[in-house]
Structure formats: structure tokens, C-alpha cells
Amino acid sequence: MGEQAKPGRDSESGFPIRPVYSRGDLPEDLDQRLTGPGEFPFTRGVYPGMYTARPWTMRQYAGFGTAAESNARYHQLLAAGTNGLSVAFDLPTQMGYDSDAPLARGEVGKVGVAIDSIEDMRTLFDEIPLDRVSTSMTINAPGSLLLLLYQLVAAEQGVPGTALTGTIQNDILKEYIARGTYIFPPKPSLRLVADTFAYCRAELPRWNTISISGYHMAEAGASPVQEVAFTLANGAEYVRAALAAGLKVDEFAPRLSFFFVARTSLLEEVAKFRAARRIWAALMRDEFGAKDPKSWMLRFHTQTAGVQLTAQ
């Protein structure tokens, strides 16, 4: 007797997974739904060649207790071949506290680098050529202040804002939902986000002004479907806030970026990324009236799901 196929199981989003798939499982309009990479709605990717033509920027999330220790680590990473930096800040910095604040006691330098002043920022990026290194800063509530310190240090190096590349997370809505490092109420916080969009358009045109994050929702228990839903809902709210502040959609939308989790369920994660690209492209073009194709593109960073790493 032939071996009987084992019953399927459900994906993390609750979709049934059959043991075997065939051509009959493909939709009839597959070619129309997929389109080519670089073509609206960007199901297969926002660039025609994707990573084969435009390699990913590789970063290691890093931030030691002091700016000097972190600077040494960044030099080590750059010497080893990494082509971008990713700054981890300690909790007091994330919450807007100086290291000598009473509420910061016991937390200074624990989960990242402590930055209290421009002196710390100078030390953090000492002898790092900011015109040749892309920097991602995982900072939200006080993000605009940290970005300004970064710009000032670059100016001291002789690097203009027009040459700076990188990303600031600046996603305050997910802090209320899943993480908790917020300082101000939602309305003034959204004003700061919109102000950052406007400032970067004028001063740092190559900078990604926000990293709209689903990663944190996933780590807090959201399924892949919920991760996309919450992330894109937040993204739409940021667009509305910027429009309400007087910006035109094509003035800021090309510099929006996203951040998703990457679980071990590979096929479902691929489907998640593709669905997110399609929904965002349609939302930006059809609801918000964006004309620039760059405004339709969902560009994102991803990293391994913490919940699926081995505990230490």
C-alpha cells in the first residue's frame, strides 16, 4: 500500500496548508496579479532587478553602554565589510532622559548607547565618514532631536545634509500599541512626525524620514495578517497627518519606509511582503492621489523574529 499523505496544518495566520500543491492551485489571472518586479503594484518588488541588481544594505544592530565603546564597535563592523550602521540607544535616551536623571537610574547603557549631548554624538561617529556610510537610528519619541545632532556632527565633518543617507524610525504610533517608549500624547507626537517630514524634505532629501514598523506588533503577538493591517493603518495615518500639515503627498511619500518581522514560515512571509506592497501601492495611488511612482513603493527593512530565536 502506498504511504498516505499526512494531513496539512495551519499557517501562523490560520490559513490551511495542504501537503501537496500543483498547477491547479494557481489562479487563472496569475500573470495579471503578479506583474513584473518594478511594475505597479510592485507585488514582486519595487525595483526591476531587486537584490540581484541593487544589493541589500547589511547592518548589525549595535549600541554599547558608552559612545566610545559603540564607536569602536562601528569601526570594527565597517572594517569587516558591513555597508551600513544601525544604532541601538539605551532606554533613557529613547524616553528623552539624560543619564543623570533619577528615573534613568539602573537603565543607563543597558540596551544600547546613552546619548545626552552633541559631545556624545561626536564621539559616537568619530572618524566615521558620514557621507559614505548609511546610518539607521532606532529612535522614536525624541527622534527629531537625535537626527539633528547627527546632522550637526556631519556638518562638522564638512558633510552637507544633501549627502546624508539613512533612516530614523520615528514611528510613534506603534509605541502606543506595542512598545511603550512614548513621551507626548498622540496628537502633538504626530505633529512632530509631520514636522520631520517637512524638515527632511528641505534639509536631508535622501533621508528616510520614518520606518513604519510591524515588527513590534508581531513580537507582541500579532499574526502576519494583523502585522500588515496594523502597519499599513499606521502608515495611512502618518500620510493624513502630513497632508493636514500642508505637505503634498509626493513631497514626502517617496521617503517613507517600513519595517517587518521575518519569521521562519518562509512562504507565508513572502506572501505577507507581497500583499503589503500591493495594498500600499493601491492606497497611495488611488486614495491619496500620489502621482510619483516612488510614492507608491513600499520599501522595507526586515530582520529575524525575536520570538523565534533560541533563548539564552
Image (spheres, rainbow, N blue to C red):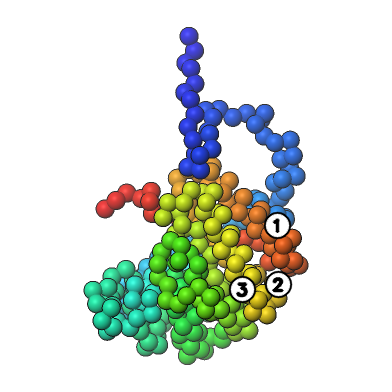
- The three-letter code of the residue at mark 1 reads Ala
Check disc 2 and report the residue beneath it: 250
Q: Which mark is residue 157?
A: none
Q: Viewer-nearest of labels 1 and 3? A: 3
Instruction: Compare residues 171 and 23 and report the one nearer the observer.
Output: 171
Residue 223 position within the rendered picture, expressed as x and y whole percent measured from the top left: 48, 48
Q: Gap in Å between the C-alphas at discs 3 and 2?
A: 14 Å
Residue 207 position within the rendered picture, expressed as x and y whole percent measured from the top left: 57, 75
Q: Are marks 1 and 3 in contact (CB under 8 Å)?
A: no
Mark earlier in primary sequence (3, 2):
3
- Dot 3 lies on which element? helix
Residue beneath the point at 51% across and 76% down = 189
Mark earlier in primary sequence (1, 3):
3
Residue beneath the point at 70% across and 57% down = 282
Check disc 3 and report the residue beneath it: 241
Mark earlier in primary sequence (1, 2):
2
Check disc 1 and report the residue beneath it: 282
**The furthest residue to the top:** 1
Q: Gap in Å between the C-alphas at discs 1 and 2?
A: 15 Å
Residue beneath the point at 53% across and 65% down = 212
